């Protein structure tokens, strides 16, 4: 397997984690209560820590003297391979939790399978990250149940968030050319095989939360090919500001 294909495969995993971590970090100090605020901040830190491991490996593979900072801060919008789901904005707490829940269920399944990769570095990252992501899934699932089966207002807001965000979930299971090459070489995960289990896990939680999966016939995609929503550029302008404004700055 060529290094460039492996690098692009890594981006397809790591960029999801970076962008969602950035979204959660925007909420630091804005949680509904102190405990939840700290929990969301810790999840963001977990995700950014995982991102570093992926990007350090990708930088090593590139052989161009890059660092994880170069990969995170010096790419343009079209070079990010994250799905559209994770870049959606923080509209309200219920929306944030619904976005987190929909990604966490997929992320945990992905890492479970990535442990079987022939790439020892990816296996190590998956085994370390799976402990964190297991907690993330419990946290978001518990909040979905509390909000969905809570007050009339909380139920309404979470159902509306689910109705809006569900159209982005199908992209999680689309295979890019780099995904297929990684799979053929025993390195990557066949995400197509995860969709049934994903839908089952989602339904179990939503049934308990008295929420309904939308009957969506049209799903949006494009993020894996670098075609993003209007929100992505604003997110990157915040994320990359210091590095762009003060190039090569050292702390």
Image (spheres, rainbow, N blue to C red):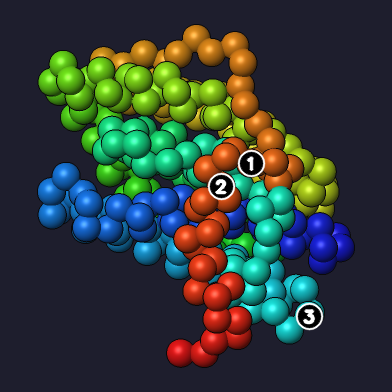
Depth check, front residue: 96 or 243: 243
User: On residue 196, which mark appears?
Assistant: none
Q: Quadrant of residue 156?
A: top left
143 vs 121, left or right, is: left
Residue pointed to by mark 2: 232
Depth check, front residue: 224 or 210: 224
Residue 194 in picture, x, y percent from top left: 59, 33
Residue lying farthest to the front in this orientation:
245
Q: Quadrant of residue 53?
A: bottom right
Residue depicted at 47% across the width and 39% down the height: 88
Check disc 2: other Cα within 10 Å, few if <14, some if 14-19, many if 20+: many
244 vs 208, left or right, is: right
User: On residue 64, which mark appears?
Assistant: 3
30 vs 2, left or right, is: left
Q: Secondary structure at mark 1?
A: loop
**In contact (CB < 8 Å): disc 3 and disc 1:** no
Label 3 vs label 1: CA separation? 27 Å
Number of numbered discs overlaid on the protein picture:
3
One can see residue 118 in this view: no
Depth check, front residue: 47 or 121: 47
Residue depicted at 55% across the width and 75% down the height: 245
Which label lies toward us, 3 or 1?
Answer: 1
Residue 100 in picture, x, y percent from top left: 39, 41
Label 2 vs label 3: CA separation? 27 Å
Sequence-wise, the earlier of marks 2 and 3 is: 3
């Amino acid at each position: 397997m060529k290094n460039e294909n492996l690098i692009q495969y890594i981006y397809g995993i790591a960029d999801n984690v970076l962008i969602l971590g950035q979204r959660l970090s925007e909420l630091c100090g804005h949680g509904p209560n102190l405990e939840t605020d700290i929990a969301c901040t810790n999840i963001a830190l977990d995700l950014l820590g995982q991102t570093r491991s992926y990007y350090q490996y990708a930088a090593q593979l590139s052989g161009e003297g890059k660092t994880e900072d170069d990969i995170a801060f010096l790419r343009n919008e079209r070079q990010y391979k994250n799905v559209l789901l994770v870049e959606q904005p923080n509209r309200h707490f219920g929306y944030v939790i619904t976005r987190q829940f929909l990604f966490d269920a997929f992320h945990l399944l992905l890492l479970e399978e990535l442990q079987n990769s022939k790439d020892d570095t990816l296996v190590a990252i998956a085994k370390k990250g799976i402990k964190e992501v297991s907690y993330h899934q419990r946290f978001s699932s518990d909040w979905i149940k509390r909000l969905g089966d809570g007050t009339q207002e909380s139920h309404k807001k979470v159902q509306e968030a689910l109705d809006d965000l569900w159209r982005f979930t199908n992209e999680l299971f689309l295979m890019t050319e780099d995904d297929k090459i990684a799979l053929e070489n025993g390195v990557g995960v066949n995400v197509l095989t995860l969709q049934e289990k994903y839908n089952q896990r989602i339904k179990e939680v939503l049934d308990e939360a008295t929420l309904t999966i939308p009957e969506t016939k049209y799903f949006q995609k494009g993020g894996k090919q670098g075609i993003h929503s209007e929100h992505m550029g604003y997110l990157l302008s915040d994320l990359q500001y210091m590095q762009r404004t003060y190039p090569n700055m050292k702390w």
